[in-house]
Amino acid sequence: MLDEFMLEEPMVETSLTLTGIGALWLILMDYTMSSQIQGFPIAFIVITSMMIAIFRSFRIGIISMLSNLAPVLLAMGAMWPDQFSLRRPPNAFGEC
C-alpha cells in the first residue's frame, strides 16, 4: 500500500541523509585512514633524518631504519593472507 502510493506520488523535494552512529563511524574511519596514510611517510622521513644525524652517517642511518620497518612489514605480512581490510572492522555494524 505504501509502496504503491510512493510510486504514484514520488516525493520530489526530498533528500537522503545518513545519520546515526553508523554514518559517524564511516566518516571517522575515513578520516583515520587518510591521516595514517599521510602521517606514515612524514614520520618515516623524520625518523630517518634523526637516525642519520645521530649516527652521523647516511649509510648507517639507512641501515638502522630496517629495525624500525620490521614491525610494520610483519604486521602487513600477517594481514595479507586473510586480505584484512583497514577500511572498517567486520563487526562494526553487527555483521559476521
Image (tube, rainbow, N blue to C red):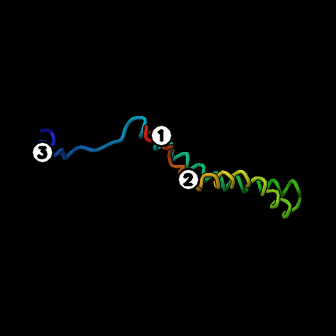
Compute the Cα span from label 1 to label 3: 38 Å
Q: Which mark is first along the chain, 3 or 1?
A: 3
Q: Report which residue position mark 1 lands on.
A: 91
Nearer to me, 45 or 59: 59
Position of 57 compared to 42: left or right?
right
Label 3, on which residue?
9
At mark 1, the secondary structure is loop
Nearer mark to the viewer, of 1 and 2? 2
Front position among marks 2 and 3: 2
User: Residue at 84% of width from left, 63% of height from top?
Assistant: 58
Query: Which quadrant of the view contains residue 19?
Result: top left
Q: Quadrant of the N terminus?
A: top left
Callout 2 amino acid: Asp
Q: Residue at x 85, y 56 (%)?
A: 53
Q: Position of residue 43 (x, y in %)?
A: 70, 52
Alpha-carbon span between mark 2 and mark 3: 48 Å
Could you tell which of marks 1 and 2 lies nearer the N-terminus?
Answer: 2
Q: Give whichever of 55, 1 is nearer the camera.
A: 1
Q: Position of residue 34 (x, y in %)?
A: 55, 51
The residue lying toward the viewer, choosing from 63 and 83, is 83
x 53%, y 51%: residue: 85
Residue under the point 50% across and 42% down: 28
Q: Give me the disc on residue 65.
A: none
From the image, tell me which residue sits under label 2: 82
